Image (cartoon, helix red, strand yellow):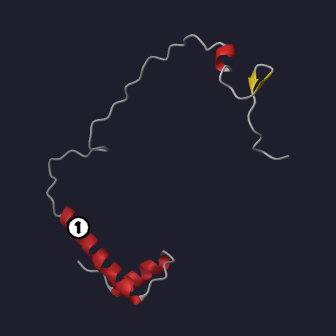
Amino acid sequence: MSISLDEVRHVARLARLELDETELLSLQSELSELIGHFVDIQSVDVTGVAPMTHPVTMQNVWSEDIPGGTLPRDVALRNSALQRAGLFVVPQIIED
């Protein structure tokens, strides 16, 4: 299946692409080749093949959400560049 140059111009206009004649011809060739691949895919016999949403069986592996001990404040602040009143001090990023 081939795509016409007018169709390529139309698609380029919809995509707001400004293409010269050489680029249009190149794009026409590439799109025609791409459409050819879709035609090949459509010709594959898939009778008896169950539809699937993902090519690999997916399952989530979750660990148990068990609360544990917390990090003591002095240990957490140990490598902090700046701290005040037991809190991290970070540079201001929002202006007044």
In this picture, is 62 found above or below 66? Answer: below
* Residue 35 percent coordinates (x, y): 27, 71
41 on left or right of 89: left
3 on left or right of 50: right
The residue lying furthest to the bottom in this view is 21
Name the residue rendered at 16%, 64% in the picture: 43
Name the residue rendered at 37%, 87% in the picture: 22
Dot 1: what SS? helix
The residue lying furthest to the top in this view is 69
Label tally: 1
Name the residue rendered at 27%, 40% in the picture: 56
Of residue 58 and residue 71, the one placed in the foreground of this image is 71
Amino acid type at circle 1 is His
In this picture, is 80 found above or below 31? Answer: above
Quadrant of residue 19 in the image? Answer: bottom left
Name the residue rendered at 76%, 19% in the picture: 86
Q: Quadrant of the N terminus?
A: bottom left
85 on left or right of 79: right
* Residue 5 percent coordinates (x, y): 35, 86
Quadrant of residue 55 in the image? Answer: top left
Determine which residue is flagged by label 1.
37
In this picture, is 8 found above or below 93? Answer: below
Of residue 39 and residue 47, the one placed in the foreground of this image is 39
In this picture, is 46 found above or below 12? Answer: above
7 on left or right of 38: right
* Residue 87 percent coordinates (x, y): 75, 23
* Residue 33 percent coordinates (x, y): 25, 74
Mark 1 surroundings: few (<14), some (14-19) or many (≥20) residues within 10 A: few
